[in-house]
Image (cartoon, grey):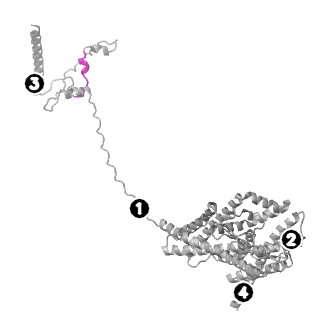
Amino acid sequence: MTHLTEHSLAQGGRSAAFATACVRGGLAAGLGAGALAVLVVVAWISSPFPDSGAGGALHLAAGLWLLAHGVDLVRTDALGGVPAPLGIAPLLLAVLPVWLVFRTARSALDPADGTSPRPSPASALGAVAGGYLLVAAVIVVYSESGPLPADLVTAGLWLPGVVLGAAGAGIWAALGRPLPGRAEAAAALRGAGTGLAVLLAGGAVLAGTALVWRAGAVRASYEGIAGEWSGRVALALLLLALLPNAAVWGAAYGLGPGFALGTGALATPLGLAGDPAVPPFPLLAALPPEGRGGWPQWAAAAVPLVAAVALGRSVGRSTGAGPARGTALAALGAAGACGVAVALLAGAAGGPLGTDRLRAFGPVWWQAGAAAVLWAAVAGLPAALAVRAWGRRVPRPKEPRPPKAPKAPKPPKALKPPKGQEAQEARAVPGGTAVPDPRDPLGIGFDFSLDDDEGYEPYDYLPASWERTPAPAPAPAPEAGPPRPSGTAGAEGREAVEGAEGDARKAEGRAGRKQDGEGA
């Protein structure tokens, strides 16, 4: 019983989550249509000469919302009386509806609180897309009563495809973006995104350069259509919404196939062939001139070349650690994915503008996609392999330099001996024994060279008040003590004294005889 109760609660929670996702899908469709309706109603209010009432403005908003999803509209008020299709969708208008579907699907599978029951991925996809398409069906029915009804064939094909694609991308993002063959597939998708971004940026540069080059014709066409200030604002907003289309047209022009300007007219870097049926419009006034193309048109081929190299560089850096076969497969996969994306964008950026010769305007989707695959495979694959090889190169070890020989130490400077020592060394005999200076018997090295100076007077170095001081008187000898009791010791002492006195008298006698001899 408990098991059945828990199962019933789980089923009830998932059913509530499914219903919530369905309601949120309908709200996303209503938010997109409401935002566009507000913009159109504001333009209608600001117009000084409105052609219709509020109902006409709302029908126009519904038609533009369907056109942003790839649905062709039909003009019933054409000059010839024949309904004319209108299939060029401003790509900037598609950003908001696609983003709303994506966010709704991702949040339905990954609720913010994390505790509420959530449906399975398939249920979330069906609920969000179903709720959105229910509101879209109401808008299609409403547009049938206006001046721009929807083409039911394209409404049954493109509208579900766009919604399911955006909702599927949201579910995939909520699941963590799982991929088969994680490393190679992720590298291929990353490379395809890089190449596509560079290609579209290059196409935008080409379109902007053409607008600046033909600025005079563009300005004349703008002023001829706009009229009052309200018309100028509305036309400026339309041009802003068509700028992504111009970038796709420029990318297709650089790829080589170019774009059609009516049946039987084609603009490529080689030139403008055929007789173009161009209506007066500022963006179409920047088309290249008729005839063969020159080097400014041929330079457009640098755009797909740079995009292919960027694709290969991204793939090579992502798969540098794997084998070369994986890098090649990832590069080819990136080329195929980039070609598919270019084909989808080319099909969405072009379409009919009327009947007869105006049925074909813009890039041919399969030609643009095939050219993108060819450029990416021819230039992107070698670039990927080259980047991989460059990243795996082994740096050559640097040869160690031989160590420098140590410098020989400088011999110490010979200490100059003092003058006394020099004189003592000068008196050294050949046998190696130095003769000591009689004036320096201890060998302390005192300099006696001053005595050899003829003008040397010792008194010159003494103070002027110097006087010879008498020698101090000798201290009185201590009195002899009493004789020792031992007679032998006393006799020895007397003999020693008498011997010393005799030696002194002999020395004085010899000194006297010497003086007498010197005097004689």
Q: Residues within 10 Å of mark 1 (few under 14, many from 20)?
A: few
Q: CA distance from mark 2 to mark 1?
A: 72 Å
N-terminal of the pair, mark 4 or mark 3, is 4
N-terminal of the pair, mark 2 or mark 4, is 4
Q: Nearer the viewer, mark 4 or mark 1?
A: 1
Q: CA distance from mark 4 to mark 1?
A: 66 Å
Label 2: element kind: helix
Q: CA distance from mark 4 to mark 3?
A: 148 Å
Image coords of residue 361 (percent x, y): 73, 72
Q: Label 4 near label 2: C-beta < 8 Å?
A: no
Residue 473 magenta-highlighted: no
Which of the labelled discs sits on residue 396, or is there none?
Answer: 1
Which of the labelled discs sits on residue 57, or is there none?
Answer: 2
Q: Nearer the viewer, residue 348 or 301?
A: 301
Q: Amino acid at mark 2?
A: Ala
Q: Residues within 10 Å of mark 2 (few under 14, many from 20)?
A: many
Image coords of residue 512 (percent x, y): 11, 11
Left or right of 412 on screen, residue 46? right
Q: Is residue 182 above or below residue 295?
A: below
Q: Nearer the viewer, residue 512 or 385?
A: 385
Answer with the quarter of the image where residue 190 lies: bottom right
Image coords of residue 431 (percent x, y): 13, 32
Answer with the quarter of the image where residue 510 lies: top left
Residue 444 magenta-highlighted: yes
Which of the labelled discs sits on residue 11, or is there none?
Answer: 4
According to the picture, the residue beneath numbered tag 3 turns out to be: 491
Name the residue furthest bottom. Answer: 1
